[in-house]
Each structure stands twice: as C-alpha cells, then as structure tokens.
Amino acid sequence: MSDVVAAFDCGTNTIKLLIGALPEVAVRESRIVRLGQGVDATGRLADEALERAFAAIDEYAALVAAHPVSRMRFCATSATRDSSNASVFAEGVHERLGIWPEVLTGQEEAALAYDGAVRNLRTPPNYPVLVVDIGGGSTELVLGDAGGPVISQSMDIGSVRMHERHLVSDPPTADQVAACIADIDAVLDACPVPVGSAATVVGVAGTVLSIAAGVLDLPSYDKSAIDQAVIGTADVEAFVERLVAMPVGQRLEFPWMHPGRVDVLGAGGLILSRVLARCSATSLVASEADILDGIAWSMVR
C-alpha cells in the first residue's frame, strides 16, 4: 500500500483536492471559487475572491486532517501567476495547510496534465495524443507519445478571461462572439503545437466535461457517464453554437449545469470548438482525470 497523499490544484475558476493511496482515491472534491475574478483587467486577486478561496481551503484542511496524509502538494496556476498580490494568497494557504503553494510554469502544468489524463485512459490510445486542458485563465495544449509530452504550450485564453474580455452581454451579441473567436484564433495561430497531427484528442477539466454532459444530454452531472466518453467533434461544435446563443437563465435549465460555471461556459466552449476545428481527429475523449491526478502521482514516483 502506497502512502496517502493530498494533491491540490488551484486554478482560475476552481480549487480541487485529491486524497488517496494511489491508485485508490479516497476523496475527490472540487469547489468553484472564481479566484481569477477580474485579474485580467486589474492584475490583482479580488478580496472577495480570496475569501471564497480561503473558505474552500478551510474545508479541505478539515478533510486532510481526517486522513493519514504523509505528503501534500499545492499547485497554483494561471490566476496566481498573473496577480500582483499573489503573496497574500500564498500566506493564506500556508496558514491553513502548513505548506506553501507552488506556482507552476506553463511547462510544468502541461506535463502534469498530460500524465494525469493519459494514465487514466481505459483504452490504449493511438499516438500522438493531444491533451486539451481549458481552465479559467489559460488553456494548455500538450502533444505527446508513450514517453510523455513532446511539445506543449500554455496560452492566456481561458473561460473566465475570454468571458470577461468579450462576452459581456446576456446573451452575447454576434459581434462579441466574433471578437472572442478572433482573439482565440489569433492565439491558436501563434501556437507551435501541431494539433492537426494528433491521432487521439483527450479533453480534461470542467469546461470540457460540462460540454460533454451537454452533448450526451445527461439528466444530471454523472461522472461515470462522462469519464472516457467519446464524443464527435461536429457534435461539440453544434452544441457550443447553441450554448453561446442562450441567455444564462436558459443555460441553468440544463440539469447537469453547475451554477458557478454557467456564465463562462460559452467562452470555454468556443475555445474547445476552435481547437477541435484544427484537429484531424473526428472525436474527443473526455477524461475526469487531469492535472490533479498528475500532481498526486508526482508525489508517489
């Protein structure tokens, strides 16, 4: 039996926790805290966003205390990379957990996301594999083979960032959607990852999993139905087009929709749709395992 580890993944929109003696997982939790609220415009973490994050970390600290955890790792990504008051957040984490958060580089983030996603695949993939990780502040594209990542890029396009920057009406206007797509395409044009060469595309994290739930038309958010689901890229595109045109109130009628994601899911969906438009693969594998699993496994090796 391996040691019990606790892995924390703190992104722009969510904070996640995994506790387990891998490969067994005892706890897997996610809280939408919108830590990156306004960071794109102000360059700093908002006071109310810090409050929400610290409340979630207090809950997580209690969960950690209830298990025989021998090692912990707290990894922070886009919002804390971009904020001028990141030290306030770091001190708050240390006070609650006794460890300091590591702010991952884009390269580290990519390697951990790839390891977490590919390790989880139940059907051996055809290589190269492209892992698409759409967060609130950034999107990682990682192309790799059986040995791990070969080339990756972390891009400053994410569901919260693109929503706040472009999709300000409810529902967004055609001009806003066009501007958002143009912004996404410009970043993808400059991305060195040859996404068209991927034989298998794996999508991870909340945006992709929510879009998969929508394409599958699920009666509730069902992890077992979503994890490893293979969905057609044309079906993703059609669903995203529908979603973006909907006001928030209508989106909330989807039984699988998380209210903390409802406003920004359209922007996240557009990022996914534009990435898939460049892929030769005609389907996407949805994976519940992601960077959080990669962080956990990094403590076991």
Image (spheres, rainbow, N blue to C red):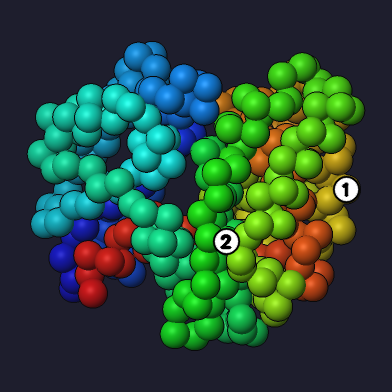
Badge 2 marks a residue whose secondary structure is strand
Q: Of discs 1 and 2, which sits in the foreground?
A: 2
Residue 191 image position (x, y, % from top left) = 63, 60
**Residue type pointed to by label 1:** Ala
Quarter of the rendering containing residue 197: bottom right
Where's the N terminus, which quadrant?
bottom left
Residue 136 image position (x, y, % from top left) = 54, 38
Badge 1 marks a residue whose secondary structure is helix
Please tell me which residue lies in front, 275 or 213.
Answer: 275
**Residue type pointed to by label 2:** Leu
5, above or below 99, in the image = below
Distance CA(mark 1)–CA(mark 2): 22 Å
13, above or below 293, in the image = above
Would you call the spot at circle 2 few (<14 residues within 10 Å), some (14-19), or many (20 or more)?
Answer: many
Q: Earlier in the sequence, mark 1 or mark 2?
A: 2
Where's the C terminus, which quadrant?
bottom left
Residue 98 image position (x, y, % from top left) = 10, 39
Q: Name the residue under label 2.
A: 141
Q: Is residue 38 left or right of residue 107?
A: right
Residue depicted at x 89% and y 28%: 174
Q: Mark 1 points at which residue?
A: 238
Quarter of the rendering containing residue 147: bottom left
Please tell me which residue lies in front, 281 or 21.
Answer: 281
Q: In this view, does 261 lie to the left or right of 93?
A: right
Would you call the spot at circle 1 few (<14 residues within 10 Å), some (14-19), or many (20 or more)?
Answer: few
285, above or below 63, in the image = below
